[in-house]
Amino acid sequence: MRNRVFLLDITRCIGCRSCELACKSEYHLAEGQSFRRVYELEWLTPEGLVVLYLSLACNHCEHPECFRVCPHRTYRKRRDGVVIHEAGRCDGCGRCVQACPYKAPQFDQERGKVDKCHFCYARLDAGLLPVCVEACPTGALNLREGEENLADTVDKIPGLPDPILTGPSLRFRLSGRLKHLLNRPNILGSFL
Amino acid sequence: MVLEKEYQVYRNVCPRNCFCTCSMLSYVRHGRLEKVAGDPLHGFTRGRLCAKGYAYVQRVYAPERVVFPLRQEPRGSGNWRRISWTEALDIIARKILEIKGRYGSLWPIALYVHYGHLGLLHLAVEGFFDALGFITKIQGNLCWSAGLEANLLDMGSNLQPDPETMAKARSIIIWGANPAWTALHQMHFIDVARRLGALVVVIDPLITATAAQADLHIQVNPGGDGALALGVAKYLVERGWYEEDFAKKYILGWEEFRSYLQNELKYTDIYRVAGVDQARIEELAKILVEHRPVALWKGMGLQRYTNGGQNIRAINALAALAGCLGFSGGGLYYASLQTWDLFNFHARNWSPPPGVKGEHRYLPITRAGEGLLAAQEPPVKFLWIARANPLSQAPDPAALQQAMSNMELVVLVDQFLTSTSQYADLFLPCTTQFEEWEIIPSYWHWWVAINQQAISPVGESKSDLEIAWNLSARLNELSPGSCNFPTGGDEEEWVAAEFNPYVYQLLGIKDYRELLQGPRKLKMPERGGEPSFATPSRKYELFSAKARQAGLPALPVLASPLSPPPPYPFRLLTPHLQGGNNSQFLNLPWLMSGSREPVLRVHPAIADKLSLKSGDLVRVYNDRGELVLSVLVTQRVPPQVVVCYQGGTGGKINRLLGGVETDLGKEGAGAPAPAYFETFVNIARI
């Protein structure tokens, strides 16, 4: 089993949204649908204003809430951890949209169905990187497999749901001032 | 999902007015563009695009894209109807000939072109009109003119080092630029330098995305950049921390400048104009001395003031003293046409028919509307606008709109019904880069890529070049010999005609078709060794006789920007938006859905005073106009400044511009630029 993880180097993300648009372009997503989204956060600290950018998509959780709540069994989890939504059987009931703490599944008004990031599994199977990772101009968004190179990463940052809930395949790398600042609990409040 | 084997893959280049000039791969199936991606063989853009670049598929097939010639009757009514190319070209050709007969001159014909497309073949618009005769031209550039002339006065030329070498700098000073939004791919080279230990300093009145990540952000007053540079220069001189040998040997006016810094310039004035304290000046001075080589990047923002040229001259002077002009690592960056100048400009360089004598009439772009209205003997009756959306982007759109209303015929070449289209009679639809051949050099990096045609023109769109051929053909049918521009041809051959043996040598190829295998980097001549300057004195001119002749200070001395008049206490800044390139891209749902723009960014202290919260509507006004915007309260703008990123208001914000010009800009660009950032407003809650 190869567990794949999105690794976001927060100090290198400049919020350019190339990842978000590369995905929209690859899959010709509907208006208002973004499998990946870039959040811009700013908060005032005694050390000055801190601005950071978070690029988030489906985290292909170990215990996916979408999978658990779907009445039509439209979600499945591959052996390598990728969570796939089979839109064919989806009737757009929206329970997964409500249940996902990361707001990954999104309702498409036009089709009346939900869809979400599938980790570019067809590209992964062809030995390619997900388009979002490939598009990142600063190398902030990465793909990691297994436990390799996760030593200097963290699994949680303030403002995001506690990873213990669903076991997201998402890690962060922090350095410098941000490492120090983000070490405080609940500074941001939930932004999702 | 797009897997390569199912597609035909073509090479394209993004032609937008941007530093990156990205090399793109376009994936085509059944004649339809389905995906664009970065070209991994391009060493500067490295296989990545910006968000706008990835949105191109939506732009090409946008339902709003106009793909047939249209005629609006009456002008301003929005009552557009489709006409044939034959009819459109016939109307234009007959009007040109009728005007020529009526006035015995082509001066009633005016051309307004800008930089909505940077391709060399798109310069066929200029080529066509030059091949017709002597017309009225809108002259100048809305953007970089002040900085360009400052560089020319100081150094005699406008060259810069390879931006990839910024990765080797030990400190990078990004002065008035926001590359995280506007020169995305440079961020990689900045990041490389940083990981190798370089310090990144951003000098900007706003906490931009670039500033937020810098090791040091100096929040200078808007337009106080030159004051800060002179303050640091004074500090360096007082401590003897400057390149004395270089100064004595290669600088003209060194003694005068030193005396000015030491004896006349006062720190109290510097603090007041720059809005920084002694500690910041010392900090910056120490970085310049201790972290060499220094890469110093002058952005476009700090020259959009009435003292914009002086700001750039002061920063250049600091770079000269601190030894970072770029002769030994590091260097001074702005934007440069050094790689453009290598090409033939075959599409642009055409002459009138034999026997036609005269000269063009030039109207400065800052006052294009006024100039067009005032032009007499003969007046202007016909306007052709291409690669531009002046009613959104130019200063004084009200005057330009009035001038357009007075014309007998206004022709607009574009892809969408822009703000400017409202006052056009004929809309000619042009191709995107995927539907044409092109060659597009960069004003930043040294790579050259070819743009090949990937799909057939959408609808009846034509390239600017083909429009010029067809119009020349119609003119010559109606009046043989009236236009010297070719009446047809092959676009790819015109790409070939832009190359010459020297470009081939620098690219290391023998034929332009080799670029179809991948972009190549120009091996530009080394600038190492003995410093040399193309100024009249052959030295770096701190003392510029040319500046003095133009009625400006000969030395780069302290110059303040304008101060807000009491009724309009806030300075309005309108920098570039992330999701758009000037007014382009802002109509695409992929980029703009969920966007808050256009909003007015306001500091919390001001918001408190006026009881404003994010989302409230305010009237933004001054004595020239007003508009209503939603407020976004943010710490990222200083209290005395409000910010509305440009492009999103369809030109409404430009109606507030103050009508003032930059101090420099004539040399190089032909005219000063609008001092966009010298606009003052008041805001009132609705």
Image (tube, rainbow, N blue to C red):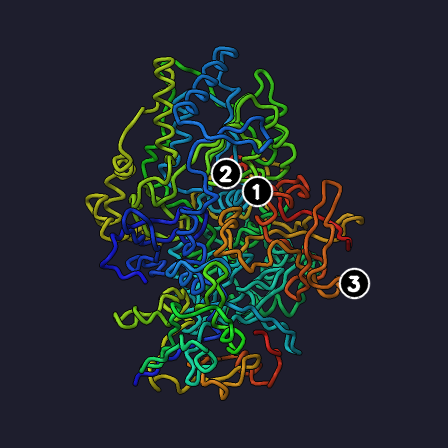
Ranked by sequence position, the earlier of labels 2 and 3 is: 2
Q: Indicate the quadrant containing the N terminus of chain B: top left, top right, bottom left or bottom right.
A: bottom left
Residues beneath discs 3 and 1 located on the same chain: yes
Q: Is residue B545 visible?
A: no
Res. B611 mark: 3
Tell which of B608 and B202 is nearer to you.
Answer: B608
The picture places residue B289, in percent across and down from the top left corner, at 51, 67
Identify the amino acid type marked 2.
Ala
Q: Residue at x 34, y 39 (%)?
A: B457
Residue under numbered circle 1: B393
Q: Decide: few, some or many residues near mark 1? Use Cα within 10 Å; few <14, some 14-19, many ≥20.
A: many
Tell which of B499 and B261 is nearer to you.
Answer: B499
In the picture, measured across the screen, residue B534 lies left or right of residue B380, that is: left
Q: CA distance from mark 1 to mark 2?
A: 8 Å
Ranked by sequence position, the earlier of labels 1 and 2 is: 2
Ranked by sequence position, the earlier of labels 3 and 1 is: 1
Identify the amino acid type marked 3.
Ser
